[in-house]
Image: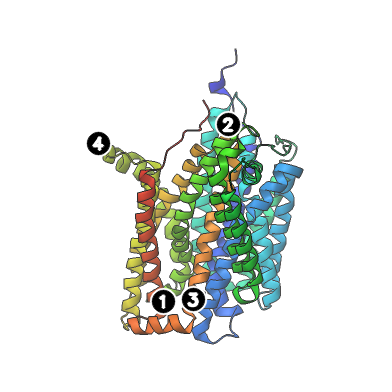
Amino acid sequence: MTNTADAPLPRQIPYIIATEGCERFGFYGMRNILTPFLVSTLLLFLPLADRGGAAKDVFHTFVIGVYFFPLLGGWIADRFAGKYPTILYLSMVYVAGFVCLALFVDNRTGFYTGLFLIALGSGGIKPLVSAFVGDQFDSSNKHRAKVVYDAFYWIINFGSFFASLLMPVFLRGFGPAIAFGIPGALMAIALLVFWMGRKRYVNVPPTPANPHSLLRVARTALLAREPGQARPGLAVAIIGAIAALACLAWIPQLGFVIGVCLSLGALIAFGGVGTSLQLERARGAHPDEAVDGVRVVLRVLIVFALVTPFWSLFDQKASTWVLQGAQMTKPGWFHEAQMQALNPMLVMLIIPFNNLVAFPLLRRFGIEPTALRRMGTGIALAGVAWIVAGTLQLAIDAGAAVSIAWQIVPYVFLTLGEVLVSATGLEFAYSQAPRSMKGAIMSFWMLSVTYGNLWVLLADAGIRNDTVTGWVTASGLHETAFLMFFFAGFALLTAFVFALYARRYPMQDFYRV
């Protein structure tokens, strides 16, 4: 009988780990210098006072794309090509995007094309790489998968830490073409390493369409007729479709990205409510497991919707906080974008502290740190971080010389929140979803990041409205401080609503027996 405890790691795993390390360094290296590059180089045609806002719009539009395109990559891999070919070809698109960034640092059309290609490539492979790792294991060595996923998470933070430290130095010392070219070279190396392992990978073929998928069950529920009963759920879904078309019609006023995201959001929100009203009508046409699974997904979507404000605050550390850092005092050799290296460093410290100290201590006092409690606390901590950041901005606006070292305080609170929300959210999503719905749940989790960044775009667009500008002026605050306290309040209010919903949320357990 084979001793599975002695089963070795699959030989192909080092190729995937090396690929992930290079890819993550490249992505975070580019992402973390994007805002200062836009302000200092690409947006010079704008008045100085408008460059920060325009840079934020570009940055958050890019992040929206990164977390929207996983839907496309997952669909192509699952239904047509399989994971390996999809990762390989979208990685080529990814590399082409870096080439555009390096070549077109003074051409907005070429540079924005590069950002689009990177969003498509990075987002498209995002849901596939970790799943591809899991495909390499079987029953003889599945117990070693945790070691690999731990290495995966470690290499992501390792790459992010050094990219955050080094790339601002290259931007300042060698110019944007080199600064964007280096991450591009790392991504090209990642593609080469991934291709070198091609003959060793386990390639799981794409699966046929599931006749009892989320969308199919929802369609059955909405269209089903019951004698003598109206179809209120269908009416709600139709209202959502009309709202979605209206958002598309308003694209000239809203902008393409905002219009499309609002349109999709209307379809998901109204369609979800409509489906929940008539879901029982799908029984018989679909197995009870599938119908109950859709009910679970609809509940989880409410949790994800309440998490979106957290991402609004978290992703602005690479935009709003970098712009704030540029107004603070610091050594001549230090670039404000390098503060972002604090985040991965703190992540690697906080996770073991929580697991070894904080959570056991809470349990000793009779407080169980459940997934929903952790997530709600994480959202609230992000709000506290932004209260601190807003207070620092008040001092800056008053003319005080504020050291950039003070940003360590909001970074600590924000990273505490990230660990409680991000890692816990993945665990929560997996545990709540039936096997047939896990792919849909993970796609919606990534969409929560998209909508978090959408709120930033909407807030920045709203602050430019004359009426809102009048409110800001009447408050006595400058625009940046006003927005900081607005987002802090947004998060704290959401954390309160989250706590109320969590108290009546019926937890599920869909781990494999």
Q: In this view, does 240 lie to the left or right of 207?
A: left
Which residue has dot 2 on it?
A: 288
Q: Is residue 72 above or below residue 181?
A: above
Q: Distance between the residues labelled 4 and 3?
A: 47 Å
Q: In this view, does 296 lie above or below 174?
A: above
Viewer-nearest of labels 1 and 2?
Answer: 2
User: Percent x, y for residue 357?
Assistant: 30, 41
Q: Distance between the residues labelled 1 and 4?
A: 42 Å
Q: Is residue 192 above or below residue 434?
A: below
Which residue has dot 1 on it?
A: 480
Q: Distance between the residues labelled 1 and 2?
A: 51 Å
Q: Which of marks 3 and 1 is nearer the N terminus?
A: 3
Q: Residues within 10 Å of mark 1 (few under 14, many from 20)?
A: many
Q: Which of marks 1 and 4 is nearer the N terminus?
A: 4
Q: Distance between the residues labelled 3 and 1?
A: 13 Å
Q: Earlier in the sequence, mark 4 or mark 3?
A: 4
Which residue has dot 3 on it?
A: 462
Q: Which of marks 2 and 3 is nearer the N terminus?
A: 2
Residue type highlighted by circle 4:
Arg
Q: Are marks 4 and 3 in contact (CB under 8 Å)?
A: no
Q: How far apart are marks 2 and 3 (CA)?
A: 45 Å
Which residue has dot 4 on it?
A: 364
User: Percent x, y for residue 362?
Assistant: 27, 41
Dot 4: element? helix
Q: Earlier in the sequence, mark 1 or mark 2?
A: 2
Viewer-nearest of labels 2 and 4?
Answer: 2
Viewer-nearest of labels 2 and 3?
Answer: 2
